[in-house]
């Protein structure tokens, strides 16, 4: 049966279209139809040549094969060797020592180094002996008194303001009382109170000018004094010290500090010196004396029956708002 199959397969191969085999003698010349190359001469060298095959259409892909078996896991790598520990660092241990320690009787600290053990001591020193008191030095010599400065010139009077509207029933009055030392003087004296505005303190007294004084009062070799007496107004209400501008409070610096009080009197005294605070006599023989702003004053009060005198450094520590308009003056020989 197998031999028959081979013969049939061979027969089928040789019977396929386009395949031909020819055998001929070497002296003959035959032309064989070649379906692929055209007409060619058949020679003896063409005997037993490889069959020319006609390539058919590509075949279909075969069935996908099964997946292969998983491979064996690889061998784990060997862990690296641990590194060598570093060398220990050096350090210092600080130990406090009490005052009773034999190494430091007054206390201190002990220092210990490691790993190479070394010990050091830093001890407190003993308390030093208290120093002796210093003797007080001799008092220095008092300096020479300075020369009094020259009084500045009075500024020019400002332009008079316009008259206010008259009140319904009030009349402004000024009372002047004077004490004259001799009959050569008269009491026809004009008194002018000058003041200026100084910002935070407000209005302050700047001078008291008395004109019409007979020049004959000041003749001779004796020194005379001029005293101006200023009456402080009475209280008109309850003063509120915390208010910035309370009209019921005293406004002057010395008044706010209690050196002069409501209803009291302030007296300001100075020596009369011709050419300094006294002018030359005019055609009538009268002179003008000026009590300047730095003149010292004293204050008395009915609160203590006028018994205590309180010193006020300067006239400018008074406020014209604290004076009620009653004035007095006295010209006397200096003691």
Image (cartoon, grey):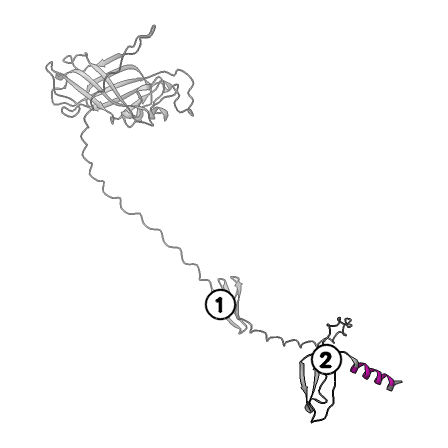
Earlier in the chain: of badge 2 and badge 1, it is 2
Report if residue 18 is visible in the image.
yes
Q: Is residue 257 left or right of residue 17?
A: left
Looking at the rendering, the stretch of residues picked out in magenta corresponds to: 4-14
Main secondary structure found in the magenta portion: helix
| Residue drawn 17% across the image and 19% down it | 288
Q: Is residue 214 above or below residue 114?
A: above
Tell me residue 99's x, y (percent): 51, 61
Q: Quadrant of residue 129?
A: bottom left
Q: Is residue 36 left or right of residue 1?
A: left
> Mark on residue 53?
2
Tell me residue 270's x, y (percent): 21, 24
Q: Image quadrant for the C terminus?
A: top left
Q: Quadrant of residue 193?
A: top left
Report crowding for label 1: few under 14, some 14 to 19, many 20 or more residues within 10 A (C-alpha). Answer: some
Report crowding for label 2: few under 14, some 14 to 19, many 20 or more residues within 10 A (C-alpha). Answer: few
Q: Is residue 179 above or below residue 270?
A: above
The residue mark sitting in front, 2 or 1, is 2
| Count of marks overlaid on the render | 2
In the rendered image, the residue lying farthest to the top is 169
Q: Is residue 290 magenta?
A: no
Tell me residue 196's x, y (percent): 27, 23
Tell me residue 319's x, y (percent): 31, 22
Q: Quadrant of residue 152?
A: top left
Q: Secondary structure at mark 1?
A: strand
Q: Nearer the viewer, residue 39 or 335?
A: 39
Q: Nearer the viewer, residue 244 or 270?
A: 244
Disc 2 from disc 1: Cα separation: 113 Å
| Residue drawn 81% across the image and 81% down it | 12
Q: Image quadrant for the N terminus?
A: bottom right
Q: Which residue is mark 1?
A: 121
């Amino acid at each position: 049966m197998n031999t028959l199959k081979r013969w049939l397969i061979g027969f089928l191969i040789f019977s396929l279209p386009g395949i031909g085999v020819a055998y001929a003698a070497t002296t003959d010349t035959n032309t064989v139809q070649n379906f692929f190359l055209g007409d060619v001469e058949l020679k003896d060298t063409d005997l037993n040549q490889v069959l020319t095959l006609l390539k058919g259409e590509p075949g279909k892909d075969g069935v996908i094969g099964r997946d292969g078996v998983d491979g064996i896991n690889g061998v784990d790598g060997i862990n690296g060797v641990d590194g060598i520990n570093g060398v220990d660092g050096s350090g210092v241990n600080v130990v406090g020592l009490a005052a009773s320690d034999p190494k430091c009787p007054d206390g201190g600290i002990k220092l210990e180094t490691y790993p190479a053990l070394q010990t050091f001591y830093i001890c407190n020193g003993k308390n030093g002996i208290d120093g002796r008191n210093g003797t007080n030095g001799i008092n220095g010599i008092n300096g020479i008194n300075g020369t009094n400065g020259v009084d500045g010139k009075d500024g020019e009077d400002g332009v008079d303001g316009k008259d206010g509207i008259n009140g319904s029933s009030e009349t402004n009055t000024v009372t002047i009382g004077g004490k004259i030392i001799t009959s050569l003087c008269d009491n026809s004296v004009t008194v002018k109170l000058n003041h200026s505005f100084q910002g935070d303190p407000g209005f302050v007294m700047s001078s008291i000018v008395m004109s019409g004084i007979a020049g004959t009062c000041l003749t001779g070799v004796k020194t005379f004094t001029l005293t101006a007496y200023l009456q402080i107004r009475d209280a008109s209400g309850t003063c509120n010290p915390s208010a910035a501008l309370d009209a019921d409070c005293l406004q002057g610096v010395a008044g706010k500090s209690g050196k002069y009080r409501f209803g009291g009197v302030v007296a300001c005294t100075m020596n009369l010196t011709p050419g300094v605070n006294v002018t030359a006599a005019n055609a009538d023989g009268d002179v003008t004396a000026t009590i300047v702003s730095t003149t010292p004053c004293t204050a008395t009060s009915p609160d203590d029956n006028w018994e205590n005198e309180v010193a006020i450094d300067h006239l400018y520590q008074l406020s014209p708002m604290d004076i009620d308009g009653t004035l007095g003056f006295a010209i006397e020989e200096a003691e």
